[in-house]
Amino acid sequence: MNEYAQRIGRLQQKLQAHQLDGMMITQNVDLYYLTGSMQTGYLLVPAEGEPRFYVRRSVARAQEESAAAVEPLGSFRGFGAQLAQTFPQFASGSAVTLAAEFDVLPVQQWQRLQSVLPHVVWKDGSMLIRETRMIKSPREIACIREAARIIDGALENALAGLKPGMTELELMSAVEHYIRLHGHIGVMRLRGYNQEVLTGVIGAGEAVARPTYFDGPAGGQGLGPAVPQSASRRPIERNEPILIDIGCCIDGYVIDQTRTAVIGDLPDDLRQAYDVSEAIIRSVESMLKPGTLCEQLYLHSLVMAQEAGLGDHYMGFGDDQVKFLGHGIGLEVDELPVLAKGFRYPLEPGMVIAIEPKFTFPGRGVVGIENSYAVTDTGFEKLTVSREGLIQL
Amino acid sequence: MNEYAQRIGRLQQKLQAHQLDGMMITQNVDLYYLTGSMQTGYLLVPAEGEPRFYVRRSVARAQEESAAAVEPLGSFRGFGAQLAQTFPQFASGSAVTLAAEFDVLPVQQWQRLQSVLPHVVWKDGSMLIRETRMIKSPREIACIREAARIIDGALENALAGLKPGMTELELMSAVEHYIRLHGHIGVMRLRGYNQEVLTGVIGAGEAVARPTYFDGPAGGQGLGPAVPQSASRRPIERNEPILIDIGCCIDGYVIDQTRTAVIGDLPDDLRQAYDVSEAIIRSVESMLKPGTLCEQLYLHSLVMAQEAGLGDHYMGFGDDQVKFLGHGIGLEVDELPVLAKGFRYPLEPGMVIAIEPKFTFPGRGVVGIENSYAVTDTGFEKLTVSREGLIQL
């Protein structure tokens, strides 16, 4: 069975378990995941039987790429009749229960679907597709491994050019130029509404410790209110922590990693905090195996941060602390599982998770480390290949 | 009256005209437009009176930046009670009619709002905010002018390094590196569901003439099915058209322009098609003044393309032709007005429009030109400053 058939099959198991008749997939990333093609259209996955990809544009390219059968989407008004030709459920006139990606589907698009498919009862299927995507195949993990190799090259290349007085933006630009030339697709995809991720956050000193809207432990100052995150134009000085939280997207798959650097040396307390972040990640690694509950990883790390006297600085500061230790990565940067309280998924082979213990010191900077891991049958594979330890230049 | 008060005032006029009690703004770009801050939260704009920005994160940064009054968002369950404190409509228990951005708001977020605000009757307000944003202020136009200056520098810099055998991706990377160092925010924002725009499309010969899902006349081949648009790894050869459709985003505002280049010379028919694209843009310029209906610009250009015997090649080829000549730009790349049949907006001072007549030759390439213009009281200002004419290297 090919990879796409396996993915469809796993989604179908969930549809059956929830007594749904099928799922209407509309989002570009989910379409790509399930068909191998990101063309515009609707993929109907019945709870049993073959899916069909109704493509508006480009039919020609979808036919080249898609593992699912492609049909040109006719007039949208006639979509119901078109579905009835291939799915008997739609011909009977009785109710059909379909899931859709309510976490990303805009209300306007949903209302249009409702108007042309009046017999459909709609349910939120966001978690079904997100849980399907949570378990990666060897081929997907290979893509992330390749992204990890490229981001390491970008890091070393950027570090080689780093000098005092260089701005955060200049350092970020060096990373971005390297990854793009090495195949970064030009965008880091994110699922959450209104969330944007550039190619990460590079920031030093007080700038990177500023509170942000960004749903992460360190968002950065940014270039201004129109992009209130990531690198600023602030020059990087000696003896302040430089947070290098970067990623790239190769063949659709992202990597996410963080290293902390300094030109010169760090004050003792920041150096100690960095050491705690490494101690946390080592300790969490020992728990990274099938069966561990995701929330345990976060709660364990929180205790370690508190025992080190750094609870107030852990994963942000004060009101702006975030309450997680890491997140799944794959086609998007904010995948399942989330390592946070209440996420009681047991770890499973094939999960890929970025783990990022960090400490924020207002006015002074952020220190920490982030590695990405694949959970294996017996433990984990560390996908991140960059050198660890505080990087002193 | 300051700029933000004017923007709110114009939206309020529309709310009143549609007999709405207010609008709940949720999207990051709309929040930035109306408050000057892109922090996460909800902006309630009543049809009359002062708006309030209920901020989840970061309250501190919103307080620094927002022109609207900021209140920390309490528990989401208590959002109704919080609104009632400041808006008497919510205290009475009778129905309140609010617009929301149904074109971008995900169903899940909407359902959460419905559950905590059960007395609200929701209406689609997408066009109200999009029409408000359609008319730019002098300050907004100044941002786009600055973006135009930077993209011209990027173009000249990239052309200076262009050699046969260079890949599309390498040429694109040169543009991207230049604009980023000059303040490009790192993302080009787009409103349409599933649509992505990188920093444009650079493509040569057959690669750029391939059909794509992208809602534009030339999407490009891309690096693979995971990013089926824009630059590919194909080397650029002599005597083939190189489409350089690029943009950048400075202080939140985008520019969009296209130039056609060739190393050597073009075959006569492609050169003639390029000349027709310039003739179209010159002719359309003569109609660019207040009062002209948007669709007239497209229909006029279509007649010119057909009279030149190039109707089949205009704005894509065959099934993959798009039916517009241009689009508004501003904080997003796909703003109003659209220059397409059925868009009967009369041009108004303050509209900013990218106009992009292009011709696609399957297997051979795409030629054309794109300039961005501000409509003025008496005509237009061309914001694009790059040299025109086929660029021969």
Image (cartoon, coloured by chain):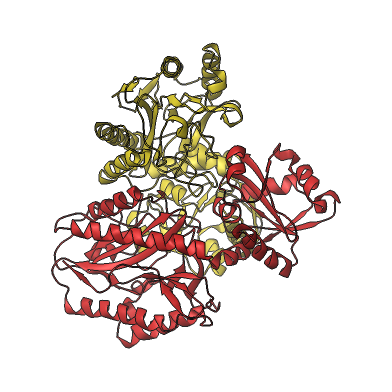
Chain colours: A red, B yellow
The answer to whether one can see residue A117 in this image is: yes
Among the 4 quarters of the image, the one containing residue B386:
top left
What's the residue at 34%, 35% (across, down)?
B144
Which x, y percent locates residue A152? 31, 62
A273 and B49: which is toward the camera:
A273
| Position of residue B383 in the picture relative to residue A329 (left or right) | left
- Quarter of the picture containing the C terminus of chain B is top left
- Residue B71 in view: no
Which residue is the extreme one toward the bottom?
A: A307
Q: Position of residue B381 (x, y in %)?
A: 35, 24
**As drawn, which residue projects farthest toward the top?**
B307
Q: Could you say which is closer to the camera, residue B376 or residue B381? A: B381
Across and down, in percent, residue A289 comes to 48, 81
Relative to A169, does residue A139 appear above or below in the rendering? below
Q: Is residue B366 left or right of residue B174?
A: right
Q: Position of residue A195 (x, y in %)?
A: 45, 57
Occupied quadrant, residue A238: bottom left
Number of labels in the image equals 0
Rendered-image quadrant of the N terminus of chain B: top left
